[in-house]
Image: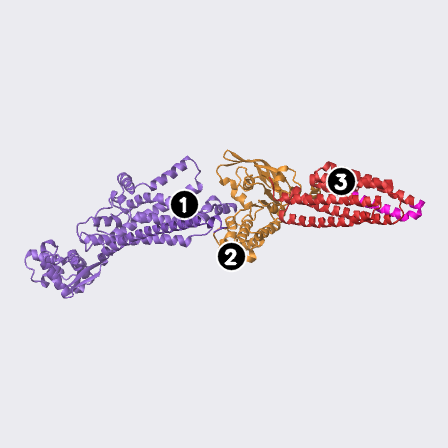
Amino acid sequence: MTEGSLHTSDAAARKLRKRYAAERRFRLYGACAIGLAMGALVLLLVTIAWRGVPAFFGHEVTIDVDLDAALIDPEGTGDPEVLGRADYSGLVKQALRAEFPDAQGRREKRRLYALISNGAAYALRDQVLADRTVVGTTFRVRVPLSADADIYFKGGVDAASAEGDRRLNDDQIRWLDRWAALGKVENRFARRFFVGGDSREPELAGIYGALVGSLWTLAVTLLLSFPLGVAAAVYLEEFAPTNRLTDFVEVNINNLAAVPSIVFGLLGLAVFLNFLELPRSAPLVGGMVLALMTLPTVIIASRSAIMAVPPSIREAALGVGASPLQVVSHHVLPLALPGILTGTIIGMARALGETAPLLMIGMVAFIVDVPEGPTSPATVLPVQIFLWADSPERAFVAKTSGAILVLLTFLVAMNLVAVVLRSRFERRW
Amino acid sequence: MTRIVDPVLDDLRQKILRMGSLAEAILEKSLQAVWKRDPALAREVRIDDLEIDRLDLAVDEAVLRALATQAPVADDLRSVLAIKMMATDLERVGDLARNIAKSALRLAERPEVPAPEKLQILADESRRLLRRALDSFSDHDAERAAIVLDDDDQVDERHDEVIRAAIDEISDHPELTSQEVDFILIAKHLERVADHATNIAEDVIMVTEARNVKHASKLAEG
Amino acid sequence: MTATSATQLRSPLYLTKLTTRDLDVFYGDKQALFSVNLDIRKNQVTSLIGPSGCGKSTFLRCLNRMNDVIESCRVEGKITLDGEDIYREGIDVVQLRARIGMVFQKPNPFPKSIYENVAYGARIHGLAASRPELDEIVTSSLQRAGLFEEVKDRLEEPGTGLSGGQQQRLCIARAIAVQPDVILMDEPCSALDPIATARIEELMEELRENYTIVIVTHSMQQAARVSQRTAFFHLGIVVEEGETPQIFTDPKDPRTRDYITGRFG
């Protein structure tokens, strides 16, 4: 290289090679980091799914119940109240005894009854109430197995282990195997999980109550935080004079966004429950607390969306004689709306996953009924997960994972909506 | 600070100054040819005039280029315009010098008649006017340019005197008519040279003071 | 007789549309304009030239009170539109801006359809009683802005999809649709290519018949081409104001000459 320029010399070529090598290394690091994160995420999801999906299914057994009219409705009134009061539990037990006459002593009988869920009697009653003509016949009904029996069929009990170490003894396993051999046991999609409220019995516990509680809470949160947040953002961005007070408000909004959520819970306890004496455990109060927590997020997201609207649009509108309010309502807000909605949805998603502040205002109570309105006692999905995770029964492990799956589905759906909204309405100026 | 337009303007100015000194030189040469009855000198004038023509073309092109690329305004614009007009005037001075040289050739072929003293004075005055106009341009001196305008009247008077004297001479010595007619022609050319000098002085005033003084006296008289 | 007086003799009779008297403008403590006295003539194009930061845009924005938006901005002195003080207590700024339209440096159509862009001003000022009337306003405004033929088949398409020059003409159409008396233009061609620029300049010449135009421009050539009068701003004062040809052939003030010939250092 005789007449070569400074940039074609050997030394320069060496430096260039080093630079390219450094670049390749850097890319490799990045790819590794992403791979690691993705791996962890996939592992998490797979674990939860693997543990949670069985919760969506439950084993049921078909039994023949002799619906003796003399026991159910001795006077033949057909009155639903009379029909509802009958001892269906006894009928189910009778059917079980008939099926397995070898169960003799009280303990053995109790073990036999323990194979069937407590919910079996209710399932039977509901079916009788739905169709009164079955009274007096031998009725073939499908009832849920108890959680322990369900776990046995799901492979959770090792029959070879010592009898004392398992929840089912040899007799119980024998009876279950017999049912299975007769083809009476079926693994079915557990609708109960999605439409039922909480229960002490794992096989009966559902997330519907918590889901509805979450929806009521979110509705209250949205109704409070969206209008308040957007109004505050519009005022701060478009109308507020720049002075100390505005600065102070701004700084505090930013600080509020960083306050731990449990603090909002304490505030809700002190102000909403103790001072304003609003109902405990209610979505109304939960929503209010979460609205307080979400408000800074909504305000900050809205402000940056409003700020991102180019000033030239405002000038253009002012230039043709639009009033400041018209500038905001005709031009700024429509253009900022996708950003505002995205921020709000992300705030809502955070509120949906929040547990700590709700614990403080009593939404952690065990509530069986599906809430009917914002003031009925309720719990929410993440709190339900927390409750189940805390339960000693082994069957709740699957329930916990199942509920997490449902919660995750909602969160992903909400984030998807945010992404779609953003790409849908994103404008080029 | 040097502007992009400055070298362009400088180049134009240099070309005009070259044209000016060439015009002065061949006017001088053509007059010498008359006074000295030198046909060789007279023939040189024709060759020299070609150089002025070439410079005139060069100025035309440079002016066009300056207008197209620099879009000059204010005094720059006035300078470019003035230079274009001055080039035309100087080119005309060159042509007039050639005409004087033609008379010199004719005079040299005929019996010698001494050039009238008044004609020599007229020649000096015209040359002085041209020199002064060119100096006022190179020095951006509007005052000196104004003197040129005043002195033009004097040249016109001298021109009239030369013509009258020549006509008298013709009536006294009809055999010298041909020579006297050439003297009249030379006087006429010198008077035109002075007019072109006046034009140049007017251009200088336009450049330096942004006043257009052309035809001012005529228009004022109405 | 001088060059200036010759052009003055040919200048037509004129009316004064806008005047400013002793106009001082402050941004906080910083004074941006010092005692500006300027008359803007009706049906003429007046160009404001001067180096960046000389106050010409500030001046322009005082004329339709766009400076009101800037909190720290304080305006003193008097600006009159047809003899009426526009900074008078109780003047309606919204109405004022309908009378004095504005076109900005960067084309800034609303991210709405071409039709909506033009119709917007007319709609908020209630200039059209019915949809056909609004259609008429939109059509005639686009026609006067020389854009109608190019967009008549796609009025419902977004205005932001047009080329830069078309967008700027759309903005002019938007300003015209409000039926203003005066159009202010803040460097309207600085983002456009020469062809689009030429188109806008032709348009200004046509619009002059019905409107009074004030334009801020950094292009000397543009000021020279389009305007009848030119004002040269420097350091917040009007150094020189006069007939455009006079400013560009024989500026009276050495600062004007230095600026337009590029001697400013």
Left or right, A115 with reference to A423: left
- Same chain for labels 1 and 2? Say yes or no: no
In the picture, residue B215 is in which quadrant? Answer: top right
Q: Colour of chain B?
A: red
Residue C11 at least partly seen: no
Residue beneath label 1, please? A304
Residue beneath label 2, please? C155
Per the rendering, the mark at residue B131 is 3
Query: In what quadrant of the picture does the N terminus of chain C appear?
Result: top right
Which of the two marks, 1 or 3, is nearer to us in this view? 3
Residue A168 at least partly seen: yes
Residue A238 location, x and y as percent?
44, 42
Report the front residue among A42 and A62. A42
Residue C77 location, x and y as percent?
56, 35
Chain purple in the figure, letter: A
Crowd around label 1: few <14 · some 14–19 · many ≥20 (10 Å): some
Task: Assess whether residue C214 is covered by the magenta stretch.
Answer: no
Chain under numbered label 2: C
Please name the amino acid that badge 3 sits on: Arg
Query: In what quadrant of the picture does the C terminus of chain C appear?
Result: top right
Report the front residue among B123 and A301. B123
Q: Residue furthest left?
A: A105
Left or right, B134 with reference to A49: right
Residues rendered magenta in the picture: B170-194
Left or right, A423 with reference to C138: left
Q: Colour of chain C?
A: orange
